[in-house]
Image (spheres, rainbow, N blue to C red):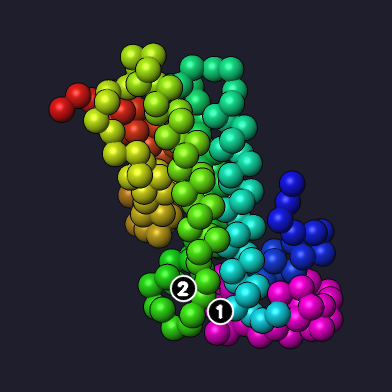
Amino acid sequence: MSLFNEKQIEIIIAAERLFAEEGFDGTSVRDIAKAANVNIAMISYYFGSKEKLLEALLLYRVSSMKLTLESVSQENISPVEKMNKLIYTYVNRIHSNRCIYQILHFELSNKKRELNFKEFIQLKKENLKFIEAIVKEGQEKGFYSNDINIALLPTIIIGSYIHFHMNKVYYIDLLLLDTEEKYEKYIQETLTPYIQKTINALLTHEK
């Protein structure tokens, strides 16, 4: 069940795009209202302020990820297959919603405004529990070693993608990805499997 109704989601999506393109400070509530085709009063009614709208955006993205992770963790497949599918899901979600990661990185690093991240952090912890469940299942069935720092697994997955994307110009030149199609294909067919192999190597490595 979604935390937000259809109209709230339309506003959140419009805000996300504008925040990523113009920055939080460079985007006005009027800009968001125009992009979402609603009046300013509706944004105030639903969210109260631009800061609260940003908080809602973060919750929306993390909560939707929770539903996906829960679904993967409950599939009737091996722990290794679950982990590979989870990694694919992470990379695909980050790539599709990279705007929010740009926004989040900026807001967490500059600390210019007081934002309530308690619910966001709680949801992140809940998401980590699904990863933990897959790892523990793999340990019980003898696939994975017992000395795994589970908290760092999302960091490796997300960090690998973010580094690649933040250095897009460099990798386009280095890997001859001279069209957007080639770039997208590389992420799906080379980068994602590479991250999967890296994580699986960590999970099976004994100290």
Q: Residue at x 75, y 81 (%)?
A: 44
Range drawn in magenta:
19-47
Which residue is more in the foreground, 181 or 162?
162
Residue holding disc 1: 24
In the figure, residue 205 lies in which quadrant? top left
- The x and y percentages for residue 179 are 52, 50
Element assignment for label 2: helix
Element assignment for label 1: loop
The amino acid type of the residue labelled 1 equals Phe
Q: Earlier in the sequence, mark 1 or mark 2?
A: 1
- The x and y percentages for residue 188 are 50, 37
Disc 1 packing (10 Å; few <14; some 14–19; many ≥20): some
Q: Residue at x 79, y 83 (%)?
A: 40
The amino acid type of the residue labelled 2 equals Glu
Which residue is more in the foreground, 4 or 179?
4
Disc 2 packing (10 Å; few <14; some 14–19; many ≥20): some
In terms of secondary structure, what is the magenta stretch mainly? Answer: helix
Residue holding disc 2: 107
| Figure check: 53 above or below 169 | below
In the figure, residue 192 lies in which quadrant? top left
Q: Residue at x 54, y 29 (%)?
A: 73
- The x and y percentages for residue 187 are 47, 42
Asked whether the beta carbons under mark 1 and mark 2 sit within 8 Å of each other, the answer is yes
